[in-house]
Image (cartoon, grey):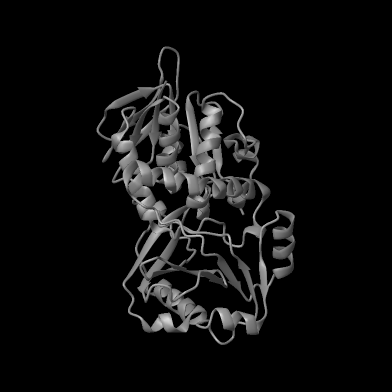
Amino acid sequence: MRVIVVGGGINGLLVSRRLVQEGVSVQLLERGEPGQESSWAGGGIVSPLYPWRYAEPVTALASHAQQAYPALVAALRDETGIDSELERCGLLFVNTPDAEPALAWAAGRQMPVQTLTRAELHAGWSGLAADADTGLFFPTLAHVRNPRLLQALQAMLGRHPLAQVLIDAEVEAVLPAAAGHAAGVRLRSGQLLHADAVVVCAGAWTAQLLAGAGVTLPIRPVRGQMQLYKTAPGSLPGMILRDGHYLIPRRDGHVLCGSTLEDAGFDKHTTEVAGQELAAAVRAIWPALAKQPLLRQWAGLRPFAPNGVPFIGPLPGQQGIWINAGQFRNGLVLAPASAEVLTDQLLGRQGRIDPAPYQPGRASQSPEG
């Protein structure tokens, strides 16, 4: 079996990995350099932000992915020598207004959570802002250093005999199978490539790419901006989330602050307004960090889909064309499970995750929201 995968972000890379492990020959096409869009730009928290607020299909994918990440990171480290730095440091939610639903959600899933009083909060997290009054700490939640994870996946595929990664290979059109012709793609260069199936993992650009084939999907770009600081390693005990903004401490003392939500189309420029918002978030969460110099600010484009539920499966009326996109803010979070759902369907077998909630055919019935 031969498959073309369009898009070299985390979803395209992990789908390609799973397919070659199943003996499928894969051509991975990326219009630029693999792993340089939203998969790189995000923070790498292996959990949806405020996970109790998400629809059950998102929770199902997140749960499977969280279980899969330790083995995935270990395998890639063995295969490539690259450590993706999966850190189970826990996530602290500060002054969360819906603490009761959060606790009920955690109890229903037997997920450990600690309720912290003001005194306990400041005793264990002494750098928090003075107005931090309550805390919910989920000790099992982790983050992964996403740029290194992407590097490891690229290295693995670069060595695999069934994988071919083509860079600067911009897809102009996706071509469904027709009488006498296999599915395929047409590149901007004019070159035609054909395979038994085409899997579109083009993130925020997915709807734009498929529009030429007459397919309408409610996926659109939402810009997110991030900042990077540096402090002494271990200064922050774990990840912290407050009022929609978060801090993520890396092993080497780098700390990420994110992120904004902006309807800016395909504009990836950073802005002063977003910079001020993120700097204010740092002061409101961990004031001492705000005294450190800002190292960098960047932006990425997330693929929004209604209710945060991605589209994973075959495109109706487009024979041989499949999609794995629309993970919105949770591309890294859901990626191992998303790849599993796509691969099981493509290979015609029943998997561990029910694929029904993710079918692209639901798009015509999905409200924006």
Q: Residue at x 52, y 25 (%)?
A: 347
Q: Can you see residue 135?
A: yes
- Does residue 121 appear left or right of residue 147 in this picture? right
> For this rendering, which residue is in front, 81 or 220?
81
**Viewport quadrant of the N terminus:** top left
Q: Estimate the x, y position of residue 123 in percent, counting from the top left.
A: 58, 83
Q: Would you say residue 220 is visible in this rendering?
A: no
Residue at horizontal 42 percent and vertical 71 percent from the top:
274
**Quadrant into which the C terminus falls:** bottom right
| 60 relative position to 127: left or right | right
Residue farthest to the bottom, as pictured: 130
Seen in the picture, residue 364 relative to 248 is either above or below; the reply is: above
Instruction: Identify the residue at the far front of this view.
Output: 78
Q: Position of residue 160 (x, y in %)?
A: 32, 32
Residue at point 46%, 54% (across, down): 302
Q: How many marks?
A: 0
* Percent coordinates x, y for residue 3 in the rendering: 40, 27
Q: Position of residue 336 (x, y in %)?
A: 50, 43
Q: 329 or 141, which is in the foreground?
A: 141
